[in-house]
Image (cartoon, grey):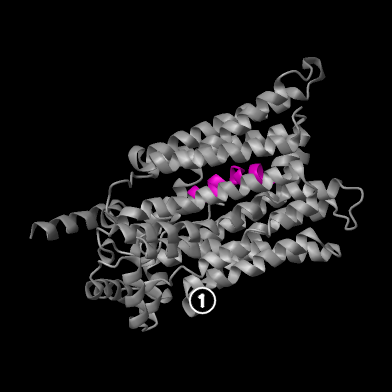
Amino acid sequence: MEGSRQPENCPESAVPPVATPRGCLRQVFYSVVVASTALHLGMVAGWSGILMKQKADPEAEVVVSEMDVVWLVSSLGLVWMFSSFVSGPLMEHLGLRRLLLLSLLPSALCWLLLAFPLATWVVYVGRVGTCATAGIINTILQPLLAELCQPRYRGFALTLPEIMVSVGLLFTYALPRFLSWQASAALLAAPFLPMFLLMLLVPESPYWLLKRDKRDEAEKVLLRLDPSCDVVEEIIAIKSSCADDPTFFEQVQQLKKGRNARPVLLVLSHFLLRDLGGPSVVFMYSAYMFAMAGVQLDAFTCSILVGAVRLLATIASALVSDRVGRRPMLLCTAVLCAAAQAVAGGALLLGRDPTLGEGALPLISLVAVLLYTAFFGVGLGPIPWVLVGELLPTAVRSLGAAIVSSVFALTVFVINFIFPSLIALLSLGGTFLLFAAVNASLALVVLFFLPETSGLTLKEVELAFASKHRLAREEEKAAV
């Protein structure tokens, strides 16, 4: 899923600008291995399709009710919020790479519990377990990737998790189309042993090692990442960056200042409006929605189309985001997502009119949802996470990221939990129109309040949120 953020302390000067060919290959290999764990995030989001097949199976020994479906699907956001908070202290104590490694085998066990449940409560245990490990993996991924890569490869590395999430989502959508729900869930446990073995080859973050006063190990890791690097200079730069870490209480005090609070509130508003616009509903209730809409294609086939479109769109986003800029991509995709949802909602409402017949209206709603998925994958999905790294001021970055991640997870839980009630109240078409209105309001926030951050240093971005009086003082200081 789209739950990634930039590391809090990873200055460009802390990594050499050029690596040997061997160092390049190693960094690419480590990046791919670490990012592959994001497959789990896509699997967790797409599991609802397997649950739908389990619920419809008359021979299933474990009966899943409608309320069970609501709780099991929506639990992702609630569990994610708590596991994200827990993973912070665990990262500091165990190390990023070690915690990521330790989360893989329990993930496989939880998928097996979902494949062979002995009772309904076992399904809940398996679901909570997969969601908890997904929250931990999501918290670790981006900091570890950024701390293992040089700046010239960091852009490539930071786009990999979102692509892997889309691959995991597509894989999970495809399985119940061809296999039983038990075989589908069991196969989701298969990738974790190879991932675990490959993760044994990945080194620990040199930043974490130096924070724990393990200088010798940090030197070995730096030489392993790039044999040509100047280890002494590297260590000095990393130690300098780590020495500037503000404490939690210092960040709370800094958050009271307007220049820090404004960008945090802006990023928070992006996530709140984006997720109230229903993306998690589209991806997690995909098969349910298409079955309810009366699309003549098989609901699982429609879900596969959604997964394939999101994967292609995510790859396209990785290729164009730095060239186009954050603001225009976010503004355009917010408008286009709102338009696609409005078309889907209108087609679904018209489809309820018996005088119009069935005809092409359900097909129009399917195409509109696929277009929404494409626009979301290009901009509305990945760009807000980029803003977390670029807009949040250094003085409150870890606290701001924790607040944003918590609100994101809570919003995902709420919108998925109330989605069946919204359908009962407004119908599926009316719910899509409501989502369209929310995305339109997000476009207005981007238009009037979001500055362009592409190509700017973090210092320049912070100055964009300073008051006019503070800017005048900065200019006077620079002149002197």
Residue 467 appears at what percent x and percent y? 28, 54
Which amino acid type is shown beneath numbered disc 1? Answer: Pro
Q: Residue at x 44, y 46 (%)?
A: 383
Give how far across and how far down residue 324 sits, in percent: 35, 37
Q: Residue at x 71, y 35 (%)?
A: 301
Q: Which residues are magenta?
A: 270-284
Instruction: Tell me if 230 is positioned left or right of 476 in this view.
Output: right
Residue shown at 33% from the left, 47% from the top: 453
Residue 392 appears in the rendering: no
Q: Quadrant of the C terminus?
A: bottom left
- Quick one: 241 or 334, which is closer to the camera? 241
**Main secondary structure type of the part rendered in magenta:** helix
Residue at the limit of the structure toward the bottom, as seen here? 213
Q: Is residue 130 above or below residue 337?
A: below
Q: Residue 37: say if magenta.
A: no
In percent of width and height, residue 166 lies at: 57, 46
Q: Decide: few, some or many residues near mark 1? Use Cα within 10 Å; few <14, some 14-19, many ≥20.
A: few
202 or 145: nearer the eye? 202
Residue at the front extreme, as displayed: 22
Can the viewer see residue 362 in this picture? Answer: yes
Label 1: which residue?
89
Identify the secondary structure beneath mark 1: helix
| Residue 320, percent from left and from top | 39, 39
The correct choice, above or below, for 11 with respect to 336 in the image is below
Left or right of 450 on screen, residue 188: right
